[in-house]
Image: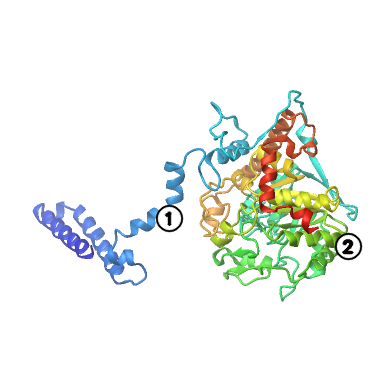
Amino acid sequence: MRKLFFFSILFLFAFTLFLMWLYSFREFRLGYLVLGVLGLLTALGIYDSFQKKHAILKNFPVVGHFRYILESISPEIQQYFIESNTDGKPFSRNIRSLAYRRAKSVNDTHPFGTQSDIGGEDYVALRHSIYAVHLKPEDLRVTIGSDFCKQPYSASIFNISAMSFGSLSSNAIKALNLGAKKGKFYHNTGEGGISPYHLEGGDLCWQIGTGYFGCRDDKGNFDPDKFQEKANWDQVKMIEIKISQGAKPGHGGVLPGVKNTPEIAAIRGLKAGETVLSPPSHSKFSNPKELIQFLAKLRDLSGGKPVGFKLCIGRTEEFIEICKEMIAQNNWPDFITVDGAEGGTGAAPLEFSDSVGLPLEPALIFVRATLDKFNLRDKIRIIASGKIISAFSIIKNIALGADLCNSARGFMFSIGCIQALRCNTNECPTGVATQRKGLVKGLVVSDKSERVFNFHSNTVKAVSELLGAAGHRHTGELSVHDLVKGDEMIKLANRYFPDTVNTQV
Ligand SMILES: Cc1cc2nc3c(=O)[nH]c(=O)nc-3n(C[C@H](O)[C@H](O)[C@H](O)COP(=O)(O)O)c2cc1C
């Protein structure tokens, strides 16, 4: 192939020179351009032949580059030319355009009937009632705050899940926070802590990850004074200890070096340019007792704000141990966020995303059943996250045990994410998940914050319509019996945890 390449180039050189001679050199100016291009291709071909990193380029100089070019745009080719309305991954075109249409507040109806396989095994639906009712979306709020909490928070049933500044751009964070402010719902900061871009006035759930960003000392340990100062800011409504997230349980956060700009490094107390791996577990606790003590301490330091923890369920017995400890210490979190293994991330090892942790459905059923068993269900709010974008997914997860839901990628879609699958490269073309200034500029905060607001309010409105269709006046009235195939779902949960709660409590 190499010989063929250089032979072709030589031939083209000779042929161009021949044409230039034929038409007398002066009149055939294009020839110089062609010679220039051929010169560049020859140089590239020589470089490709001598480099040692890429076998493809060595064996197929110059043309081998097409492989890399096509590979780099394969998500776009897949999305624009190959995928159907229902099979895009992780989110189908139907779901993405639902989010886009709700964000733009344009016609969100669907023509001609379902494209889903409603005879298939995965089909789950709401049992509607003959006696449908009408209700107001703004009434769908849930109070978070147990008996120990002095500043309970009235939450929307749909909120922005944890995504840090660093993982997302400054403009993305600003747009999310402004949208949350306008729509009166909360914005989880993500484990990167509170950045200046979070301070647009939207309610914050401050997430404390294993890196303790924003409340750490020089050695990376938790600093109670720094925590107390920020936790008492009015904009901070709740505090969430991040134990794990579904996309990479047991791994710890990953901030790729290319996204660790001097600004982010300064906010988090790091060295710019280095890939930052947060530890996989907390230094403040290593058993249920210390976790509950830490939680109670955070509540005290924050002046009695709701404090909870987020986790993806792995070993069920560990969760049961934590519940036992709540009873022993007579203290419990105000909320628990259950993140399914199907959850998203900015960057994670593939094996962790694909093969660690429980999906949301069985995890949620397990957590609800376990809290029930310990008589804690009415004291602790359950928040669900994991591919929750449509109003039905909110209804379904609340019916399975949640009180309210969070969405990360749904809100990313609302600010223009096109599922380009580049969050880990700093090359996000929409300016959502990148720190490159030239790309971030494209995300106009005033426009996108309005879309965040629209996406939320149109989705909650759709929830209220579905609830009304089922004859309910509040999400609190939903139960697994509202779902078609509810029994099969319980069976599914039992397959993962045969009698877990009964035998292990
Ligand atoms: C870009 C991105 C960054 C994220 N960063 C965090 C984080 O800092 N802390 C965390 O607990 N979860 C993080 N997550 C996970 C989400 O908060 C959420 O739990 C998960 O994506 C499930 O929600 P989704 O399916 O709606 O995206 C991140 C997710 C994405 C997509």
**Residue 433 image position (x, y, % from top left):** 57, 55
Q: Quadrant of residue 18?
A: bottom left
Q: Badge 1 local density, few (<14 within 10 Å), some, or many (20+)?
A: few
Q: Which residue is mark 1?
A: 72
Indicate whether 249 appears above or below 204: below
Residue 27 visible in the shown view: yes
Relative depth, front residue between 437 and 348? 348
Q: Name which residue lies at 34% across and 56% down.
A: 66
Q: Amino acid at mark 2?
A: Ala
Q: CA distance from mark 2 to mark 1?
A: 55 Å
Q: Quadrant of residue 295?
A: bottom right
Determine if the C-beta at disc 1 is less than 8 A from ligand 1. no
In the picture of the structure, the residue carrying the numbered disc 2 is 328
Quarter of image, ligand 1 = bottom right
**Image quadrant where one finds the C terminus:** bottom right
Q: Nearer the viewer, residue 451 or 126?
A: 126
Mark 2 touches mark 1? (CB < 8 Å): no
Vertical side of 455 occupied by 212: above or below = below
Mark positioned earlier in the residue sequence (2 or 1): 1
Residue farthest left in this picture: 22
- Residue 385 visible within the image: no
Residue 355 at x, y percent in the picture: 58, 58
> As shown in the figure, which amino acid type bears the numbered disc 1?
Ser
Q: Where, quadrant-wise, is the N terminus in this rendering?
A: bottom left
At mark 1, the secondary structure is helix
